[in-house]
Amino acid sequence: MKPEFAIHTEHLGRIYKVRGNRREKRQLKERVALRDVNLQVPRGEFFGLLGPNGAGKTSLIKILVTLLAPTTGRALVAGHDVAKYPQSVRPLINMVSGGESSGYGLLTVRENLWLFAQFYGMDYRTTRTRIDELLEIVGLKDRANTKTSDLSTGLRQKMNIVRGFLTDPHVIFLDEPTLGLDVGASRDVRQFIRNWAAAKPERTVLLTTHYMAEADELCDRVAIINAGKVLDCDSPANLKRRLQREAIFHLEVSPLNGVVHGFEHLPGVRKFVHTPGDGKSELELILESDDAIGGVINTLTTHRARILNLQKREPTLEDVFVDLVGMSLAEAEKNG
Amino acid sequence: MLRAFQRTFFPAAWLGWQVESNWTDPLIFFVFSALKPIASVMILVFMFNAVSRSGTDPALYAYIYLGNALYIYVGAIMAGTSYSILDDRERYRALKYLYIAPISIPVYLLGRAMARFMTGTLAVGITIAAGIVFFKVPIHPMRANWPMFFAALALGVLCLAAMGIILGSITLTLRSEPWFLGESVASALYLFSGAIFPITLLPATLQPIGFLMPMTYWLELMRRALLGSGSASFPTLAAYSNASLFGILAALTLGFGLLAFILHRLFDRIARDKGMIDAQSNF
């Protein structure tokens, strides 16, 4: 009987021991990458992990694909414990990581793919057919006999995507698959992943990303993760719906004249994010109701700040993140 | 089980051959493969001639020349196998994808060792041929015991691959200067394996290391196969029959094979605990 959950984690934790510098006498320090992560991903789901860099997304993926041992708790993939029985997990999974140039540069695209197909025990005919099909879909057919070292980053990432999907895995782990790609290549990759998931509804996809729109566009459910902790998990629509009773405003102001600290005490202002820019500042405000915007405008006017633009908009996953973490994704990345 | 072995070993050997030979065009590869070992062996030939001005002892000369030529296999297979872990992890960033594939990493490394053996054979063959043709090394191919040579070669290559897997597994867990391990072990064993001088010339306290090393017996067997009675002028292992040497080498190969299996599992666990399988060192 197939397990109900493709991925199941219980109190999963991971602590890295990091050696300090000379001034710190090279003492080992502990860095918590994951703490008490409990996730259940049913078979066939497109599941997203959304969080800033350093949130613990990659550590979680590494544990699930058997590359990293958890410090506490346990994780099951396709019903198998990843720490105890990695050899049972491996034939059923594959992984694609973005933002890196992996692959044997002196082999051609086709040779790289053929090599990994052999490692998965794929027969000659299936390998050939699938390589041709997938290269055609991602637009790499005409580069099949090009050495990988001669490919651009985007094309190399497309080859990596093909390598990951070539083995038709039951569970595929996509770790920031569009990282470092230009807009066109990212769109192609997202389109390919979406089509694959739609064509194989029994397969499970776990995608990590720090691009809100990507998670929103692709995922059935999203877990928001920060500082190693899963803060919330639901469908993008449900996560956003929770903010719909609030009013979300976007303002462009010039100059701000130090007024930003005053917002914290204004009635009706739940959260705000200030992003300084060239000659103007951007403000994202989550307000308890539309009425609260009056107080914000009054404060800005009193401080002689000029409002260049004011927009009320629908909540996004970015707003959900701000609501949960108290800062924007970019700020969370800066704070590390 | 055999199919699992085949689907890992042969692609790994093919990959290894591509990595070793496909970095340039065939002519440059051949010139490089020929010049590098001949240049290194020439240093030894001139040193030997300078030191023994009173006249060259042909038996000692052949002993040193062959030891040096055959030691190419140690660097190629043992150090090379451990180096391929670093190559995959840090140069090609592919080790993590190999690790999550349903393959046995020791079998994969055996495949990579096979490729190193093939390129090593090219270098060894050229060096020995150059020795016969240009440096007057007294080897007579027609009188060599080829069955014994190939049997000893096969056992030695297996043993070196096992040692390479051990070093590769340890290398996986090293965060800084990981490349040093394979090369330094190969260099250190150069002294202890009787490659360029009989191990009885070592201080008595260091001689046991030489007697524990499979290369000592392997080189002796290879020399006996190629030099015939000429190799008997060195008394270190003269008391041992060919059968005894084969027995010791086979036992050590089995021992290192088991050790490779156990240590790979141990260091694999350590690497996963430390998060080293896809780490970047200062390689």
Image (tube, coloured by chain):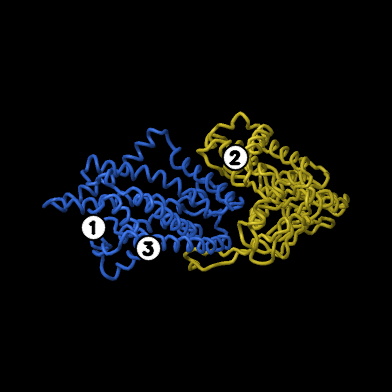
Chain colours: A yellow, B blue
Q: Residues within 10 Å of mark 2 (few under 14, many from 20)?
A: many
Say what secondary structure mark 2 lies in: helix
Q: Residue at x 59, y 66 (%)?
A: A30
Gap between marks 1 and 3 measured at Cα: 18 Å
Amino acid type for the residue under numbered disc 3: Ile
Q: Nearer the viewer, residue B251 or A217?
A: B251
- Which residue position is annotated with label 1? B232
Q: Quick check: A319 left or right of B33?
A: right
Q: Nearer the viewer, residue A225 or B187?
A: B187
- In the picture, the disc for residue A113 is 2
Q: Quick check: B249 left or right of A198?
A: left
Q: Residue at x 76, y 44 (%)?
A: A218
Say what secondary structure mark 1 lies in: helix
* Nearest-to-viewer mark from 2 and 3: 3
Amino acid type for the residue under numbered disc 2: Leu
Q: Residue at x 74, y 62 (%)?
A: A38
- The image position of residue A66, as x and y in percent, is 63, 57
Letter of the chain that mark 2 sits on in the rendering? A
Q: State whether residue B22 is above or below residue B112.
A: above
**Is residue A219 something one can see in this rendering?**
yes
Q: State whether residue B14 is above or below residue A324.
A: above
Query: Do the residues under discs 1 and 3 have CB atoms within 8 angstroms?
Result: no
Q: Residues within 10 Å of mark 1 (few under 14, many from 20)?
A: some
- Which residue position is annotated with label 3? B248
